[in-house]
Amino acid sequence: MKEIKAFIKPNRIQRVIEALADSGFKSMTLSQAEGTGAFKAKGARPSLDFHVTDSPVVKLELVCQNEEAQAAIETILRNGKTEEPGDGIIYIANIEDAFHIKTGESLKRFDL
């Protein structure tokens, strides 16, 4: 399985979520975040919580099967991109397994 973390501009997140849902990715987590990358948005401001200048971003997280990851990445890239610099970044990580808390059932698919 793959974990995909994408940091996306707030004005593009709705478009990304809808495109992912239309592609079959229904379960994801969204978090408001502050980015401190090389690009500073026009609306960047000093953070109230940290001693840095930040740009608002939304962190989208989803976990999918290995064979589904490329489709999710392409969907995020296609729908998150703007004409401006600083569109965000996507990280991919391997997930060994995941379990439903209620049943203890593994979400890992085995290729036997």
Image (cartoon, rainbow, N blue to C red):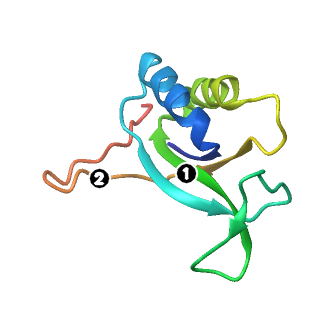
Residue nearer the viewer, 69 or 42 = 42
The percent position of residue 111, horizontal first and vertical second, equals 44, 31
Residue with the mark numbered 1: 59
Q: Distance between the Cα atoms at labels 1 and 2?
A: 22 Å
- Image quadrant in which the C terminus is located: top left
Is label 1 in contact with label 2 (beta carbons under 8 Å)? no
The residue positioned 48% from the left and 34% from the top of the image is 65
- The answer to whether residue 23 is left or right of residue 43 is left
The 10 Å Cα crowd at callout 2, few under 14, some 14 to 19, many 20 or more, is: few
Identify the amino acid type marked 2: Phe
Q: Which residue is mark 2?
A: 99
Give the camera-side residue of 41 and 89.
41
**Could you say which quadrant of the image residue 104 lies in?**
bottom left
Q: Residue furthest left?
A: 102
Q: Nearer the viewer, residue 73 or 19?
A: 19
Callout 1: helix, strand or loop?
Answer: strand
